[in-house]
Amino acid sequence: MSTPSQDVWVRVEHAAGTVAPQTYELLGKGRDLARELGGRLVAVLLGHHVAALTQTLGAADVVLCVDDERLGSFTPDAHARTIQALMEEAIPRLLLCGATSAGTDLAALLAGLVSVPMVVNVRGIQVDGTRVLATSQLCGGKLLCETELGESAILTVLAGAFPAEAGIVRRVPPVETMAPPKAIEQTRAQVLRLIEPSGEDVDITRVPILVAVGRGIQRKENLPLVEDLAALLGGAVCASRPVIDQGWLPLSRQVGKSGMIVKPSLYLALGISGAPEHLEGMRNAEMIVAVNTDAGAPIFNVAHYGIVGDMFEVIPALVAHLTRRKAA
Amino acid sequence: MKIAVLLTMVPDLVEELEIDASGTALDAQWLRYVISESDDHALEQALLLKDRHGASVTALALDYGDVEQTLFTALAKGADAAVKITPMPEGGPRRREAAAVFAEILRRQSADLVLTGVQAINDLDGHLPGLLGGLLDLPYVGVTRSVEVAAAGGVIVQKEYPGGVVAEISVPLPAVIGVISAPQPPRYVPVARIREVMKTRSISAEAAPELGAQPAPAIRRMFKPEPAGQATMLSGGTEQAAQELAAILDSRGLLR
């Protein structure tokens, strides 16, 4: 592998012809980091028929683009092996990937392939002289860890960690188009088809009031209590991953990293601890109210109002007061 | 088909987490370990493949925490063999080292399909299955919600993308798959059955390989986050808090 440079690479995440909003957060932060380190900000864009996207990456000093049919649908194999080949030419000081379903897969596989250290779920990056420090989240956001990175590192970054504005620059950046590497011929996993969410259920991204439940709901039999509250508020019930995995609510109701990203007027989080994967899907709600028995639950860090208490006591009391107010 | 399921022990978040005197790690003295949730799903996925296709399932785990209980539970649920890799440092190695250990063991006992949870709550320096795919130079797909045997050979997995989109991906074997959830919740096994298995079955021990230093970031400190202090806490008991919340929702025009 080549000698590490001071360049900062950002993996451009995109789907259906649109760059994912988090990419701009990474480009904005990457711009500052590259300036402080004295390197370039490089946007790494892999895909098929992606030339038009380069024009939206003006924050980058240069866009490194590999356009090939085999990169059209994301597989960790093809994308990680392509970046591995790019690293043979030039290894960056930092490679920033979103901690998304694709970013997480790619970054871990790549780190194993190229023997470069990795830090996951990063929410802060600082340059201190010649050192680079990363702050990452563990244990569902209950712990933070500060690490010092060596001469090169691969990071997965949580959505919302940095503002997106600095990454949106109206400028057409220079593009270096690279040929697909030979390694891509070895990639073996193939996307057969994409299955879109079925449109039969309520679209929770369009519902203004969401009553969300997590592990605290304990049993499927407890769901009617929450459904009644949602009905009273004119909203819908949604959930964090554990409730969906139990099969108590359909996948279309999942909020979070691989579920839906929602921005309702009110998000009432009941018995949800607030793991980063869930927060990613709801942190931009206009008003967040959290009810949890654990006063230290990370959900209270993003909530506007919080109640430390048992949801099975709070809900009936809330229903009674709401009913009284609606009747008045 | 030979399936290896890698099971990882992680801190039980129900317990209070304490940082040790070095300030760079969790205090193992106060920790209780449980199986990583997505690993439990990986085991369920393996057992579903066994039920449907007669695969043989070996559960492998690193020797720290209450790993024997976890491995006996895997046997009670239907795994054919259980392997403990020993010795291990207290609290277990970091993920990168764990990946290197498992890679070495899997070179010794090959498997057609390696299943493990795509992530664990205490991941810091990587996620196990991706790192393992890289170290073994095998095809890798993670964040899967189902794994099926393909008629033409290999497996077909359903991988979650954002926005509820699912990709169906064909993966030739051998391969490493990072499971986020199995098609059904992990099966329940009564304690009496686990106790019975503890008397009748055994866990084999495999010597942990000697490894050189793995690429890793240097941990400077581990700490609890300061509360962001954003939330206005409604206190004074359930009744008063509920009353106040109803008033707030009303004042915001959220009652219609």
Image (tube, coloured by chain):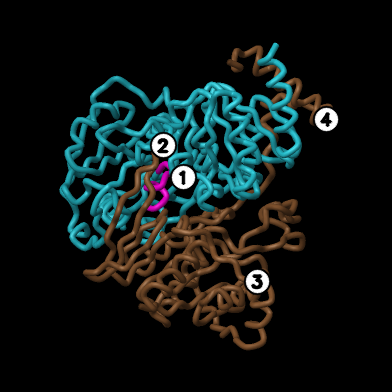
Chain colours: A cyan, B brown
Which chain does the residue under circle 2 lie in? A
Decide which of B84, A240 is in the foreground and name it.
A240
Q: What residue did someone put label 3 on?
A: B190
Question: Answer yes or no: do the residues labelled 1 and 4 have beta carbons within 8 Å?
Answer: no
Which chain does the residue under circle 4 lie in? B
Q: Distance between the residues labelled 1 and 2?
A: 8 Å
Do tags 3 and 2 sit on the same chain? Answer: no
Neighbours of disc 4 within 10 Å: few (<14), some (14-19), many (20+): few
Do tags 3 and 1 sit on the same chain? Answer: no
Question: Answer yes or no: do the residues labelled 3 and 4 have beta carbons within 8 Å?
Answer: no
Q: Is mark 1 on a helix, strand or loop?
A: loop
Determine which of the numbered discs, if any, sits on residue B237 in the image: 4
- Residue at the location (33% across, 27% down)? A59
Q: What residue did someone put label 2 on?
A: A201
Determine which of the numbered discs, if any, sits on residue A250 in the image: 1
Task: Tell which tag, 1 or 4, sits nearer the viewer.
Answer: 1
Q: Position of residue A110 (x, y in %)?
A: 36, 56
Task: Tell which tag, 4 or 2, sits nearer the viewer.
Answer: 2
Q: Distance between the residues labelled 1 and 4?
A: 34 Å
Q: How far apart are marks 3 and 2 (CA)?
A: 36 Å
Q: Position of residue A57 (x, y in %)?
A: 29, 29
Question: Answer yes or no: do the residues labelled 4 and 2 have beta carbons within 8 Å?
Answer: no
- Highlighted magenta segment, given as a residue range: A96-105
Quarter in which the N terminus of chain B is drawn: bottom left
Residue occupying the far right of the picture: B236
Residue occupying the far front of the picture: A327
> Of the residues under marks 3 and 4, which one precedes in the sequence?
3
Give the amino acid type for the residue marked by disc 2 in the picture: Asp
Which chain does the residue under circle 1 lie in? A
